Image (tube, helix red, strand yellow):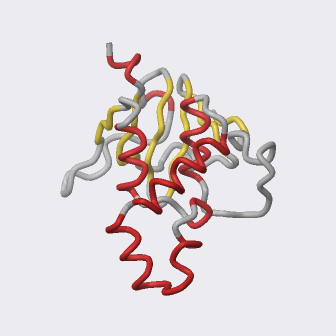
Amino acid sequence: MWVADDGGRQAAGFTGHTGDCVVRAIAIATETPYIEVYRALHETALADAWLRQRLERRYGARARAHASPRFGVHRRIYDRYLTGRDWRWTPTMKIGHGCTVHLRSDELPGGRLIVRVSRHMCAVIDCVIHDTHDPSRNGTRCVYGYWQPPTALR
């Protein structure tokens, strides 16, 4: 099941198509305003010396602009953000083991999740996908893993 949800993106004044699925998924799952998540991830990316150096090599003078969550968020940045809020990562795939969990309600736990699939992240709340589109591929999309809040772990 899928519910159309932009995570507050439009209300925050953002328009157009971007690669901001990480911001949307975190905003929806954590119930944090979109702009607050956006700014925190952007500041974390700008402060990360390794990522900044990598972007400068690739984009030169435009590196600061490419640290923006509009261009996607590097895993080390959202990992830092979520672990800092005590969310825990649960991997569901291992190299050479194939796909064992799919993006569908009967294979994911209940509660609030931030689910990572190929080239995308989405929020899943009580087994319902919350995103701007349905990324499930009719229940066949492989889940690499998911983040759970600290309250779900007790």
Give the total number of marks visible in the rendering: 0
- Percent coordinates x, y for residue 145 in the rendering: 35, 43
Tell which of 64 and 79 is nearer to you.
64
Q: Vertically, is 53 above or below 49?
A: below
Residue name at image x 51 percent, y 77 percent = 63
Q: Vertically, is 146 above or below 118?
A: above
Horizontally, residue 1 falls left or right of residue 84, namely: right
Horizontally, residue 42 falls left or right of residue 102, namely: right
In the picture, the quarter occupied by the N terminus is top right
Residue 14: quarter of image: bottom right
- Percent coordinates x, y for residue 72 in the rendering: 53, 62
Horizontally, residue 109 falls left or right of residue 6, namely: left
Tell which of 38 and 104 is nearer to you.
38
Residue 27: quarter of image: top right
In the picture, the quarter occupied by the C terminus is top left
- Percent coordinates x, y for residue 23 in the rendering: 58, 48
Tell which of 15 and 57 is nearer to you.
57
Q: Residue most toward the top?
A: 154
- Percent coordinates x, y for residue 95 in the rendering: 20, 56
Residue name at image x 35 percent, y 37 percent = 83
Residue name at image x 36 percent, y 29 percent = 86
Residue name at image x 71 percent, y 44 percent = 6
Q: Vertically, is 62 above or below 139?
A: below
